[in-house]
Image (cartoon, grey):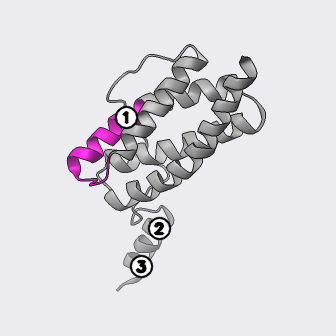
Amino acid sequence: MNKLTLTLIACLFSLNVFSETNNSEKPVQHIIVDNIASFSEAKKVFIEMTNELKAKTVLDESELHQIHMITYSLEKSLAFYAENLNGDAQKLAEDIAVVVEDIHLASENNRQGSTREFLSNYFELSQDFIASVESLDLKKR
């Protein structure tokens, strides 16, 4: 290989062009989901969408598309929580939102392996978050 080719390859690697997940990758807005306006609505959406994600086990092209669509609602739920919680619960909502964005991008681009990894991470974090949300409900009563 000549020097120009090696330089080009080095540049492409530095830009993560060869990696499966490109950090500069931006999602395409395929659907518009209404904002969430209450804790009860945010909780309902979060739990329902999490259960729908748990039902996706094959991760073929059809399921990846369904997962991609589910992430739109999850993003709205987590945005509500991130704006209306504080402390550890808020930080956890923000952390989960990052993972949901990873799921969104991976599923949108039909990356089965990455989607499975991100879902696994999401399910771990969501267990703690659901427990946190449940304790918030108890405090409100």
Image quadrant containing the C terminus = top right
Magenta stretch, overall SS: helix
Judging by the rendered image, the residue that carries numbered circle 2 is 11
Closest to the camera, between mark 1 and mark 3, is 1
Q: Nearer the viewer, residue 94 or 127?
A: 127
The answer to whether marks 2 and 3 mark residues whose Cβ atoms lie closer than 8 Å is no
In the image: residue 106, left or right of residue 92: left
In this view, which residue lies farthest toward the bottom? Answer: 1
The secondary structure type at the circle numbered 1 is: helix
Q: Is residue 67 magenta?
A: yes
Q: Is residue 96 above or below residue 1?
A: above
**How far apart are the two marked residues, 2 and 3, measured between alpha carbons?**
9 Å
Residue 70 - label: 1
Residue 48 - label: none
Task: Report the amino acid beneath label 3.
Answer: Leu
Task: Report the amino acid beneath label 1.
Answer: Ile
**How far apart are the two marked residues, 1 and 2, measured between alpha carbons?**
36 Å
Q: Residue at x 47, y 73 (%)?
A: 10
Q: Is residue 112 magenta?
A: no
Task: Report the amino acid beneath label 2.
Answer: Cys
Q: Position of residue 61 (x, y in %)?
A: 22, 49
Q: Is residue 139 above or below residue 56?
A: above
Mark 2 neighbour density, 10 Å: few (under 14) some (14–19) many (20 or more): few
Q: Which residues are magenta?
A: 56-72
Q: Residue at x 29, y 47 (%)?
A: 64
Q: Quadrant of residue 115?
A: bottom left
